[in-house]
Amino acid sequence: MLASARLTSSPAVRHAAVAAAGVALAFVVSRAWNLEPRYLVVFVAGGCLAAVGLGLIAYIRSLLLYVLAFCLAFASIEKSFLVTTDSTFVTSGIAIGPSDLALIGLYALWFLGICVTRQERVPRLTTLDKWVFAFWAVHILSALNSVSPILTVYEVVRLGKYVLMYFYIAHNLEWPDLKWIVAGLLFTIALQSGIALVQAQTGRLMGVGRTKGAGDLQYEQYTVTNFESVRRAEGTTFDSHALGLFMAMSLTIPAVLALSPVVRREWRLIAAGMLLVGLPALAISFARAGWLAFASAVAVILLCLASWQRWRRIAMVCGFGATLGVAAVLPFAGKIKQRLFEAPPELISARRETIEMALEIWRDSPWTGIGANGYMVALEKNFSIFEGDPYFIPAHNMVAFVLTEIGIVGLVVFTGFSIAAVLANRRLIRDGDTLVGAFGAALLASLAAFHVEGITDPIYATSVTYNLFWFLLGLTGGLTRLTAQRTNN
């Protein structure tokens, strides 16, 4: 009896029984409706493929999750639909790219796991989840007084895709996924740095992010006073400032892993190598805000090491960091010096003026803002500033930009959302000098870089950098969930 029960409970026997039942059902159906043999073959083959697909859901989902990680550099390579005439510094349509297709597949398979196979449950919302959805909700709320309702809808759709990516990673990340996700991040760093070096040295592939991969299209960078002749690397991002922020945020991962004692030596060496590979891309973005953002990220990492009392590693970071930093930037020292110390003061005053204009626009709708994605339209209406004018740019401050577009309510939610992300990473860091703590330090450093960059530029809203931000936030949510499960078990 026991042997019989064990036999019938084995997966092979169950699958064979299901297959036999399916063939029998197909035979009965074909006889009842007098179907041709080809329809019977299609019926049986389709059923078998569906059965195989359901059995491989877990593997396909892992693969698609890794696709998201390896596609981080390609968020700008997408096809846009329902495009409006407004196209500069706005989300001008509904875009679909490789990451979106992978995300659609992930949610379809997750739905099957919850509603069809019933092997999973609907996840409970965490504190960070609630703040994330509240941030999305205030974007919807901003449509009430939007200067361009259609543009606000497009931004709500775009943000919704990022929120869905965050939510999936936060509730489906598993420990074995980390190594492939890190591999995707390291691949992205190497790719961005390689493209950046080609752009800076030869001028080829320039504008590959703005022209959606069509590197042969005519493209000219916007000019910077006293820096007109220098090619500023952009990688696959929107512009050089976006590349600077992208590298500042992504380099925190290899930097921390290279220092973690729980990572095997060969992998620490690979992480250190990718850090060295990525630093030149950060340097030749010639984005001062990006450099400052990375410096703030390094400061956060050092503070985490100090909280773990790893004084030797702090000394090692300072020593090797100075050595690697000099080696990475020495070939570009003259241009970096020019960018830091010879930039005209008008650049700072112009940024201040954009903030003043933003605050004047904000007064038209202080509570819910003038509508997500509506800043450039409001700029045209309020100041008669159009494309081609030097001031036809977003407000160069993240707080002013958020306040103008989604109002006081939106800014309060954005602040709470940011604090919730910091606290979630802090809980990871409290795990100590472990792999979890290392990821917590890296993700908190990345978050710091994001906000420091925002002091001078709302470049976070561009596709590649914003996609990276939500991906890393998903890692924060996922690791928080996994550590809580480990503690409870």
Image: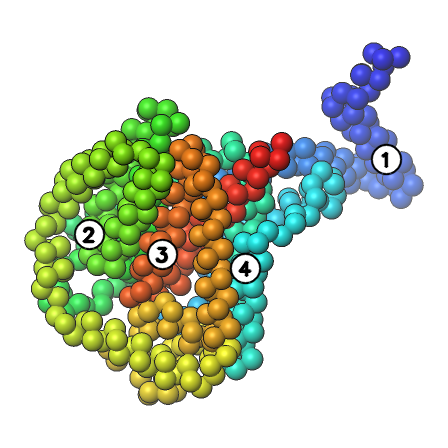
Determine the residue positioned at 74% across, 37% down. Answer: 47
Q: Secondary structure at mark 2?
A: helix
In the rendered structure, are the residues bearing label 3 and label 2 in contact, judged by CB atoms less than 8 Å apart? no
Is 377 or 34 nearer to us in this picture? Answer: 377
In the rendered structure, are the residues bearing label 4 and label 1 in contact, judged by CB atoms less than 8 Å apart? no
The numbered mark at residue 450 is 3
- Left/right of residue 275 with respect to residue 407 in the rendered view: left
Disc 1: which residue: 25
Amino acid type for the residue under numbered disc 3:
Phe
Say which of marks 4 and 2 sits in front: 4
Determine the residue positioned at 54% across, 77% down. Answer: 143
Say which of marks 4 and 1 sits in front: 4
Residue 281 appears at what percent x and percent y? 24, 48
Q: Secondary structure at mark 3?
A: helix
Q: Secondary structure at mark 1?
A: helix
**How busy is the neighbourhood of tag 3: few (under 14 within 10 Å), some, or many (20 plus)?**
many
Disc 4: which residue: 131
Q: Tell which circle, 4 or 1, labels the residue nearer the N-terminal end.
A: 1
Amino acid type for the residue under numbered disc 1:
Leu
Q: Tell which circle, 4 or 2, labels the residue nearer the N-terminal end.
A: 4
Image vertical order of residue 32 relative to residue 139, above or below: above
Residue 416 appears at what percent x and percent y? 49, 62
Residue 198 appears at what percent x and percent y? 21, 48
Q: Tell which circle, 2 or 1, labels the residue nearer the N-terminal end.
A: 1
- Left/right of residue 153 with respect to residue 310 in the rendered view: right
The numbered mark at residue 284 is 2
